[in-house]
Amino acid sequence: MVSNFNMGHTQLVKEKIKKSVPEIDEIKFVSIHDFKIADYEDYDIIISTEERKEKDKRIVVIPNILNETGISTLRAHLDNMNSMMIENATPFSPECFILFSPEFIFTDLEVKTKEECLKIMSQAMEEKHVVTEDFYDSVMDRESKTTTTIGNGVSLPHGSPTAVNESKVGIAILKNPIMWDNEQVQVVFLLAFRLSTRDEISRIQMFYKEYVTLIDSEEKLEKLKSMKSNIELYKYLIQ
């Protein structure tokens, strides 16, 4: 907080913020004349009692933090920051980034059957030696035994770990939905997972945990379908 408060006023403000906005972990006070924004790059919010020359999204001007208007202004600024963080959040954590590659992502893919779709996706992986020549057959073998549709027009097929050289996730956004067993599907995630080491197992567990939030609403699925290229979708997943 940037102000010219005396010690008593500073203590009052500190207690007011702690009581009214308990999610704030740490509050540091600095005088207006001593403040240099470069010294506070690690702080999430900069509250100033007067307008600042610096242009920084973290700065919120609150002349009197002790009244209800001041606290309401701070709360609104916090809510806005949280909304922006959620909107810009990366679907997957860095641990999972290695699972995605642009060459295994297809947008606007035009196919008529699930067999055609899975063949294209499997071949792309085989050409890069991510999977063996047996992978596609193992995927289709699983398809013959159980459905891999999971609702909302999404399918999650996978092949045998013994036919995988390197864990990867293939993604296809179809130009038009196709019949996949008894359901129309337009979004396909083809899983090629090895489970040979603890790190691999941990990464796969993290993927499944975060994957759920990637597709848990119609709005998020529409965002995936709106991607214009494999690069755009790849960046969305990891940046």
Image (cartoon, grey):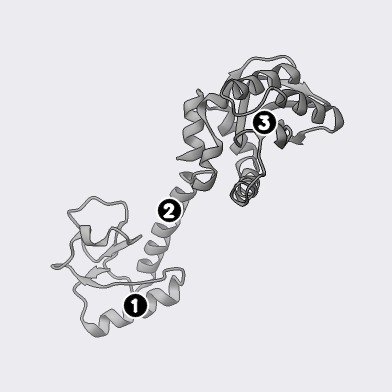
Q: Is residue 43 left or right of residue 225?
A: left
Amino acid at dot 1: Lys
Where does the image place residue 176, in percent across and percent down from the top left?
A: 67, 18
Which mark is drawn over residue 221? none
Where does the image place residue 24, in percent across and percent down from the top left?
A: 42, 69
Mark 3: secondary structure? strand
- Using the image, determine if residue 150 lies above or below residue 28: above
> Residue at 54% across / 34% down in the picture?
100
Q: Quadrant of the N terminus?
A: bottom left
Of the residues tagged 2 and 3, which is closer to the observer? Answer: 3
Name the residue tied to disc 1.
14
Amino acid at dot 3: Leu
Check whether the beta carbons of the residues at disc 3 and disc 1 lie within 8 A of each other: no
In three-dimensional space, the C-alpha distance between marks 3 and 1, rounded to whole angstroms, equals 52 Å
Name the residue tied to disc 3.
190
Name the residue tied to disc 2.
80
Structural crowding at the residue carrying mark 2, measured as other residues with C-alpha within 10 Å and reported as few (<14), some (14–19) or many (≥20):
few
Where does the image place residue 200, in percent across and percent down from the top left?
A: 61, 46
- Using the image, determine if residue 132 lies above or below residue 77: above
Of the residues tagged 3 and 1, which is closer to the observer? Answer: 3
> Residue at 52% across / 38% down in the picture?
237
